[in-house]
Image (cartoon, grey):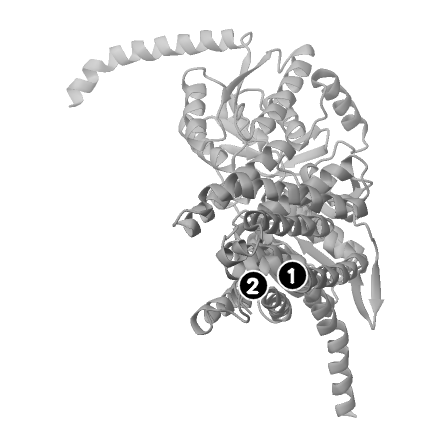
Amino acid sequence: MKQRQLRHTPLAAAFALACLTLTASSALYAQAAPIRIGVVTPLTGTYAGIGQQVKWGIDLAVKEINDKGGIMGRKIEAIYEDEEANPNVAVQKAEKLFQVTKVDFLTGTVNSGSTLAVGQVAERNQRLAATTVSFSDAITGDKCSPNMFRVNAKAGMQSAALVEWMVKEKPSPSVFYLGPDYEMGRSTVAAFKSAAEKRGGKSVGEIYAPLDNKDYSPYFGQMRAAKPQVLYTSVAGNDTVRFLNQLSEFGLAKTMQIVGAAGTVTAQNMGAIGKAAEGYVTGAAYSADIDTAENRKFVADFKAAWKNEPDLYGVDSYGVVYFYKAAVEKAGTTDTEKLRAAMRGLEWQTPQGKKLMRAGDHQAVQDMYAVKVTNGKFQIIAKVPGEAAVGPDTCTRF
Amino acid sequence: MHGGACMNELLESLQFIYGPQIANGLAIGMAVVLMALGLTIIFGLLDVINMSHGEFYALGAYLAVTLAGQGVNFWFCLVLVPLLMAAIGYFTERTLIQRVFHSKDRHILTLLLTFGLAIITEDLFKLGYGPNPYKPESPIPGASELFGIMLPNYRVFLIVAGSCIIVAVWMLVYRTRLGAMVRAAAWDKHMAASLGVPVERVYAGTFAFGVALAGLSGVLLAPIYSVFPTMGKDFILMAFTVVIVGGMGSIKGAVIAGLLLTQVQSISSLFISPVWSEPLVFGIMVLFLIVRPQGLAGRLGHG
């Protein structure tokens, strides 16, 4: 055994030397070669609209950075793969980008399942990845990955922002909850309820109405008897049209502040809800109306380039490229270990304001907003500091 | 002293909780009765279970939305839509229902036919109007307070208008010559035909009348419940329950059962989870089918 090892020593040494020269030359070559960012995002299917915003945001940032000389003298190149919002496809495409295209960094996943799966692919390939869209709390919670970062706000931050605004507006408010009777309805109410109770909210009643419920007025008796100051709801689609209209017809809308989930009042049903939507408040991570010089410039550039307004997904995808740039410049290299260390605790500038990448769970801490429907449009009425909205670090894997 | 406080509390809960609940249940009851009336008349006379009744209701609402978009006033729609719907109903009966009506499998064939019609109509709504809801403005906005009971003005109007329609339908069927012909055709079509009643036209006319009632409900209820492709399914289960409990084909039974069942739903939802209020109502229906399958009252033209 020992003899065999000895006999192989000269060969091993020669091999090592060859390797060394190769790495050195490739390192030299790398100075000029572009940095490759792989983007696995849905370009077709249900989520194609989101994928479009992701691409617009990234392309705009890449162009801006390249025009100013790139990152440490290297240009950036974004390489797209369609994941069809399907975790299985996302895994294959991510693997291909890491193994064949040899990308330095990966982003773009929309579906939370895709993000979780791609995080594992990144771990195997010893590269880093970030999501700019996925909301699921688990991504930076119990399913956190040392190789995955999230630059956008998670679901919990939206309801936390709403609670923060609520308790400031009405200290220790009495709250009534009404949600649709299925998983989403019950989990959104449970999350908001626990957040509200922690901040001194008093729960005075909760109702789960069947999905596609036609008339909510039979529950108004319970609601009237409970005399709540705030009503939280997570109904969606046409249910919101009926619920909010019936509340206002019965004169109940005037007696309490109505707040709700992000999907309750949307561009799709706002028109049909009409006047009854006025005054509705929800939590949000971004609005094109944010009145700062950075955001005004971003919105103008985005519109000039793509003839469309940026949304939440567009702005966060724009931001992830600057996040990567700041981290590489801080680390002075694209080496995974050093880059990860640089990303942890990194502060960087985005159109939404300054963001901080929390070291403990890789969740970006950012200011959140309470937005209110005014004249048929969402308007920012309050800013909630990021530290108040983000909640405790629950990641235990690293 | 203590008793007084207790009494006050009871009065207060009667006034502020039960009162509005009962008054509001009455408005929903009217909506259900309007739907059930057309259904029960068509069943009572033609012996056809009209599975597309809900879609005729939706069609009435969509017609109202379309006409309103052309600048037609709501009150005019209230007259125009039932007339249009009657024509559509007459045409449907002559071209579709009549084709399978005389088959010995009439029940199953008309059921399948109207069921298919419902599916096609619903998809046509999706194609023509898209999946997003429309919400017509309430023609009588605001709310009124009566004895401390707060009720939207439009729902008060619905209760009044619904009562008028019920009385008018009852008068038409039981107090006019036309109604006598309808009842005669339902009782014995051969005898009626031999006495000179144009039975075929009475059938088509009755179907048209039922469809017009569904369309009228669509116009009346659109400002409360909004308009969207699957709205036909909203009241149809409840309307069928009312027709079964009231007695298949009975106008009186449909009115009583409709108002009673919606009160049960309304009052019970004060105490139990909304999820249980439907099983409660359907439980009553099952009970009726076991104990009194003929329902509260007899069939149209049969007493």
Crowd class of label 2 (few under 14; some 14 to 19; many from 20; radius 10 Å): many
Q: Is residue A102 left or right of residue B21?
A: left
What residue would you read off at disc 1? B173
Please state which amino acid type lies under the numbered disc 1: Val
For residue B12, which quarter of the picture? bottom right
* Place of residue A176 in the rendered image (x, y in percent of width and height, measured from the top left): 68, 61
| Numbered disc 2: secondary structure | loop
Whether residue A361 is visible here, answered yes or no, is: no
* Place of residue B19 in the rendered image (x, y in percent of width and height, measured from the top left): 74, 72
Identify the residue at image location x=69%, y=15%.
A64
Residue A340 vs A358, above or below: the answer is above
Label 1–label 2 contact, CB within 8 A? yes
Out of A274 and B34, give the one closest to the viewer: B34
| Numbered disc 1: secondary structure | helix
What residue would you read off at disc 2? B300
Q: Is residue B77 left or right of residue B112?
A: right
- Labels 1 and 2: the sequence-earlier one: 1
* Place of residue A13 in the rendered image (x, y in percent of width and height, measured from the top left): 30, 12
Out of B219 and A246, give the one closest to the viewer: B219
Quarter of the image with the C terminus of chain B is: bottom right
